Image (cartoon, helix red, strand yellow):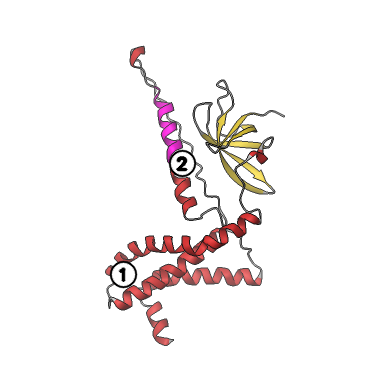
Amino acid sequence: MKETLDAAFSTINIIPTVLLVLILIYWITVIIGVFNIDSFDIDADADVDIDVDVDADVDIDTDVDVDTEVDINAGDSILWLNSALSFFNLGKIPLMLLLSFFAMSLWGISMLMNHYLNNSSIFLSLIYLIPNFFVSLFVTKFLSAPFVKVFENSGGKVQNNKSLTGKICKVTLGATHDKMGQAEIMINGSSFIINVFSTEEQFILTKGDSCLVIDYLKEKKIYLIEPYKN
């Protein structure tokens, strides 16, 4: 036991150990009631607002809408980021539960790697943390997988269907009929981000606009929204 503690708090393992200790302190506070399990929960959706305006006096035949192109690329980047975060179950279960699995994996692999490789170099231990980080992500995904259904069944995740039709949302990333954006919607006191298009070409939605959810395109997993005025 003493050897394990000595190794855990040695300089070559101190980073994973500190992370694990912080996680343990959090769970102790949960047990005594200071925090609850959702205290540090987040959504797996990125809220990014990119707006680039370019004015150029060029021939009409060669004019290019740079603003639209940049916004579309931004939307594609957001979809990619959302997919990556969702792949590792971020947003599907509480963040602190995921961090707990990650910290345990990072610490365990670090201890075993430095022990069996007979490493005593701080520099090498930092290098080893790079592959350890990525391996720990996949270990976390595996360990957290059984909890995804539990939290989905408990209502922790919004289902992508027509149940949101008729609800009010607020635009967080500008959208048009042809350009995808994002909007925030409140459900039972929790905030969720949905991908959206406007229902008509004349509706140009900007950040902060209040909108009404009109329909859901199941094949594209996109919601159609339009401006809402009280």
Can you name the residue that lies furthest to the top here? 60
Q: Nearer the viewer, mark 2 or mark 1?
A: 2
Q: Considering the image in quadrants, where does the C terminus appear?
A: top right
Contact between labelled residues 1 and 2, with CB atoms less than 8 Å apart: no
Quadrant in the picture for residue 127 = bottom left
Task: Compare residues 38 and 161 and report the one nearer the observer.
Answer: 161
Q: Is residue 11 visible?
A: no
Judge left or right: residue 173 versus residue 120: right
Can you name the residue that lies furthest to the front here? 219
Q: Considering the image in quadrants, where does the N terminus appear?
A: bottom left
Task: Compare residues 122 and 86 and report the one nearer the observer.
Answer: 86
- Residue depicted at x 59% and y 72%: 28
Residue 136 percent across, percent down from the top left: 41, 64
Question: Does the stretch in magenta take in 201?
Answer: no
- Residue depicted at x 41% and y 82%: 4
- On screen, 1 above or below 189? below
Q: Amino acid at mark 1?
A: Ser
Work out whether mark 2 precedes mark 1 in sequence or the reverse, and give the earlier one. Answer: 2
Q: Is residue 60 visible?
A: yes
Q: Which mark is residue 78?
A: 2
Q: Report the magenta residues as a range.
A: 65-78
Residue 108 percent across, percent down from the top left: 41, 73
Residue 210 percent across, percent down from the top left: 64, 33
Quadrant in the picture for residue 34 = bottom right
10 Å crowding of disc 2: few (<14), some (14-19), many (20+): some
Element marked by disc 2 = helix
Q: Amino acid at mark 2?
A: Ile
- Residue depicted at x 33% and y 62%: 131
Residue identifier under label 1: 125
Q: Main secondary structure of the magenta part?
A: helix
